[in-house]
């Protein structure tokens, strides 16, 4: 069964980037994992899902990025949460060391 994102393309316009925020998992001292909604922190790391058509955008689909914590617009598509941020709000690309 295809998900909504597979059926519909959400393409940011201009200098905008669509990001799937990374889920924040918090663990108590006793080892119990708390759900994301129990945390007051807003994620600021996520995977780029789509980018606008501007030449100013320096990130690519599939990259993991860090973005300003309270920037962008939160949206929900088919139960999944995303954030659309301006390219200037993307602070860094996370590269995994091997």
Image (spheres, rainbow, N blue to C red):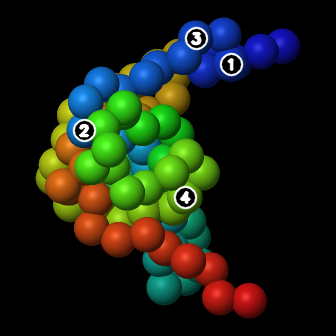
Query: Horizontal and vertical percent for residue 41?
Result: 27, 61
Residue at 77% of width from left, 15% of height from top?
Answer: 2
Determine which of the numbered discs, if any, sits on residue 15 in the image. Answer: 2
Determine which of the numbered discs, if any, sits on residue 8 in the image. Answer: 3
Sequence order check, earlier mark of 4 and 3: 3
Cα–Cα gap, marks 4 and 2: 16 Å
Mark 1 or mark 2: which is in front? 2
Q: Secondary structure at mark 2?
A: loop
Sequence order check, earlier mark of 1 and 2: 1
Sequence order check, earlier mark of 4 and 1: 1
Cα–Cα gap, marks 4 and 1: 19 Å
Q: Is residue 24 left or right of residue 72?
A: right
Quadrant into which the N terminus falls: top right
- For the residue pair 87 and 77, the one nearer the viewer reads as 87
Query: Horizontal and vertical percent for residue 29?
Result: 48, 85
Q: Secondary structure at mark 4?
A: loop
Q: Residues within 10 Å of mark 3 (few under 14, many from 20)?
A: few
Does any portion of residue 69 appear in the rendered image? Answer: no
Residue at 51% of width from left, 29% of height from top?
Answer: 80
Cα–Cα gap, marks 1 and 3: 6 Å
Cα–Cα gap, marks 4 and 3: 21 Å
Residue at 51% of width from left, 51% of height from top?
Answer: 60
- For the residue pair 35 and 44, the one nearer the viewer reads as 44
According to the image, label 4 marks what residue?
63
According to the image, label 1 marks what residue?
6
Query: Horizontal and vertical percent for residue 5?
Result: 60, 20
Sequence order check, earlier mark of 3 and 2: 3
Residue at 36% of width from left, 65% of height from top?
Answer: 66
Does any portion of residue 25 appear in the rendered image? Answer: yes
């Amino acid at each position: 069964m295809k998900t909504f994102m597979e059926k519909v393309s959400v393409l940011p316009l201009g200098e905008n980037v669509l990001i799937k925020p990374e889920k924040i998992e918090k663990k108590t001292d006793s080892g119990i994992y708390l759900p994301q909604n129990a945390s007051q922190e807003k994620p600021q790391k996520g995977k780029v899902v789509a980018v606008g058509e501007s030449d100013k955008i320096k990130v690519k689909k599939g990259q993991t990025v860090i973005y300003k914590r309270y920037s962008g617009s939160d949206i929900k598509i088919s139960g999944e949460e995303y954030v659309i941020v301006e390219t200037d709000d993307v602070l860094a690309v996370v590269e995994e060391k091997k």
